[in-house]
Image (spheres, grey):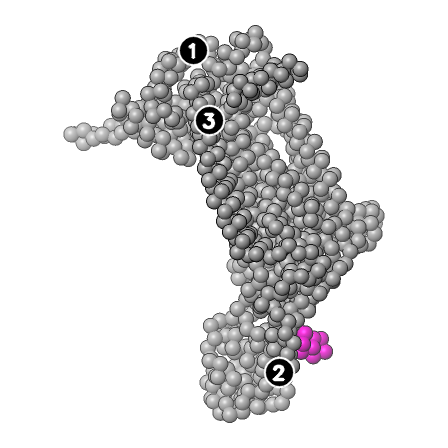
Amino acid sequence: MNKRVEKTTDWLDERLGIAKGARSSLNKIFPDHWSFMLGEIALYSFIVLLFTGVFLSLFYVPSSQQIIYHGSYAPLRGQSVSEAYASTLHISFSVRAGLVMRQMHHWAANIFIAAIVVHLCRVFFTGSFRKPREINWIIGSILLILAIVNGFIGYSLPDDLISGTGIRIAFSIVESVPFVGSYLAFFLFGGNYPGTSIIPRFYTIHVLLVPALIVVLLAAHLGIMYHQKHTQYPAPKRTNKNVVGTVLWPTYALEAGGFFFITAAVIAALGGLVQINPIWLYGPYIPYKVSYAVQPDWYMGWLDGALRLMPSWEIVGFGHMIPNAFFPAVLLPGLTFTALSLWPFIEKKITKDDQIHNICDRPRDNPWRTSLGVGILTFYIVLFFASSTDVLANTFNTSLNLVLWTFRILLIALPPVAGYVTYMLTKETAGLDDAGQRRAPVIITRSEDGEYNSVVVAEEPSLRPSAIFELQEVSEEKAYRRAAQGDEDDRELVGAPESSSVDDNGGVHREDFHSQRSGGSGIFRVPRNVPGGGGLFGGRDSRRQRRRDTQE
Amino acid sequence: MGGALRLFVLASLVLKVVAGFYWSCVVVRFGRVMNASLGGLRFSRAKAFGVSALLSSVVGSAGMLAFGGGTSAAQSNYQQSSVKEPKSVTFTQQNRPPIVYRKPPSSLIPEGRTLFTENCSTCHGVDAAGSSRAPNLQGLGAATIDFWVYTGRMPLADPTVQAIQKPRKFSRQQTLAIAAYVSSLAPGGPGIPSVNVAGANISQGESLFSTNCAACHTITGVGDALANNVYAPSLYGVGATQIAEAMRTGPGNMPRFGNGTLSNAQVADVVKYVLYLQKPQDPGGLSLGHVGPVTEGFVGILIGLGGLMLFGYWVGGRASR
């Protein structure tokens, strides 16, 4: 088995000379932190989107042609529906695995955009967009816009009553652009609303144009990240000039591959077990029909909320009345995305900071950015919740107007409050290395005189994860670098001391560490919850560790 | 066909679980080999990979099983109606008229008078002619009385807000008695409708419902809040008679759909569709209350992304110190 692999790779190497590049790629170091995996969720759900989308495109008919429905869903039989709607019903009821694929596609889209937003928040609050990563931040912002646009268009493709209402609103929003609105809208829709062009056009945009753009930009996004190397959190032995983490092969590849399966599993579970967008209950879209309680998918919620909260002012400018919808639905997103994409430059203008930053800020260490971000985020969260005013009023048996006015007030009042509270909290915790971490366990003893004494349990440096991780990866990396004529300028080295012992961690030698590991049960587990450490599932490990300690 | 398919799905489920387990064993084994040879692999990664392979196969199979029931219908071209109609929505034309309006039996009038005097006359007056607190009921007909009383809206809980549906206070006979008494005071108004649901056309009903009712009650019939404390109630759990009564009499803020707007046959069609909506064909798993994207968004963000973030927290590293 191994021989055959070796032969194949040799064959390839002799012809393409891949070994050198492959070796250095396989040894690529990625800093390991759970918050760096948020972007991976987006990447993997995008892959799920591609696969399920291809399946759906085999059966979907992008046509507004009206036909008489004769399919298997009885309550609509005999009605005049568009071919797009009929084919979506066909996918849902008659195509084997069609419904689960449709639902997976829809859930994956919801998760895709949610993951992008959370990833964006991580990058923003850790300051990872600073020099040299401004270009990647802009690419990321464009990816977010593309994802939202494609989500909305995909949501409209089934041509059901609710998504049709969404297209109707979109048409009015385009129309509301001063001076050129009606031309733009007619250009986009190929004539007056609804017309017969919009579904085929949306289909081309949805399956060809935007996905191609996303793939290209995604490749650029990842390529630049690979080239510039990932940022890392501040920690001992991590500097602006190195990267401390795990090697791509096998560790990081296994982790990422496993995480892809987990993402696919969660999406498949939602797709199979939780219904989404039951278009058969919504019926076909006919322009004179409308359903109450219509919301867009969550990522358009903030725009819907802005439309709902906008007071009915008639604003006159340049001698013309500017349509009301222009302000919440064109101006707001325009400003939002412009400010978002240009944020690295805006911040640079304020801070005058032109240094290269490869170390993330801890959010608490940069109070003004964190509190500003929280304030702005709160603004959009209020808008997002405002898109469900009617559902909230109905659920809590209160007046729709009361809910609406509450949101209008919250929209203005809540962001400053949230920002201020964040500012105070970050000020309080800034610069503390162990803020928010679990305290080391102590043993409290009481003497005969009634005096209490607390002793920290096992303040053993050898049990610190930092003492264990970096050592184990040093050895491989150093061996490789010695073999590959040791390019000392490469800053992608593992943050390791020159000697094989770590003196500042209490003189723990690598040999000690190895013997301790092989003395275990054979399955080595890094003790996550060593005294002073944190961790969600760490309790068991720490008990195991203690047990091992007592046995020895 | 159905049996064979179910067996197939079951067999694939078993296979997938076995394959997933085998795969995870391989991966765990692989992890151990790597662990030994490289001496540096964090074993938890290999385990995460193995567990995820197992998880994806189990969960994916569960999903397959969940939809399996919904799509066991034969592959059919949606242009041709080759699929048998489900029993619940069979179109059987019967000779009965779509709706018969009956006056409640006049033998109940004395009982009705007593009940009305005891429970209603404080506000509506002894002769149901109304007062400063309540409207005149004379000439409204039996259907109005039956709807308000039998859905529990009358007697009113709070006269300042929209009448809410409560547990009904009167039995069927008592309700009919009150209706008989009030409709005996003055002529006019529809009698109590009896709907021929079996003879109605559900597809027509859907079309009429989405045109006339969905704008307030929502397309799935769950109801929603309208402006200024007014709301369109949920249509779940409402009987055929009450639906027809509400359409014909227009209680509260609801518009009245008279004979000129909807024919008896059309009212029966709508009734049939509303009854269907209460227990619709609902494949695809948990229905999330048919509220639409609001609940879907919460599930997508909290369970979908939130769950994945927890997994990421488990697989990924923590801050080292």
Circle 2 or circle 3, nearest the eye: 3
Chain identifier of the residue bearing label 2 in the image: B
Viewport quadrant of the C terminus of chain A: top left
| Front-most of residues A206 and A338 | A206
| Front-most of residues A351 and A40 | A40
- Mark 2 neighbour class, 10 Å CA radius: few under 14, some 14 to 19, many 20 or more: some
Q: Residue furthest top?
A: A485
**Residue B15 counted in the magenta span:** no
Q: Position of residue A330 (x, y in %)?
A: 73, 45
- Give the residue drawn at x 47%, y 44%: B14
What range is drawn magenta here? B257-267
In the depicted structure, whether residue A51 falls above or below residue A2: below
Query: What kind of residue is marked 2?
Result: Val
Chain identifier of the residue bearing label 1 in the image: A
- Give the residue drawn at x 60%, y 80%: B193
Circle 1 or circle 3, nearest the eye: 3
Element class at badge 1: loop
Q: Which mark is residue B100?
A: 2
Query: What kind of residue is marked 1?
Result: Ser
- Which residue has dot 3 on it? B30
Element class at badge 2: strand
Main SS class of the magenta portion in the image: loop
Q: Position of residue A528 (x, y in %)?
A: 40, 28
Label 2, label 3: how far apart the Cα atoms are: 76 Å
Q: Is residue A74 visible?
A: yes
- Mark 1 neighbour class, 10 Å CA radius: few under 14, some 14 to 19, many 20 or more: some
In the depicted structure, whether residue A149 falls above or below residue B33: below
Which of disc 3 and disc 2 is earlier in sequence?
Answer: 3
- Which residue has dot 1 on it? A500
Residue A526's image quarter? top left
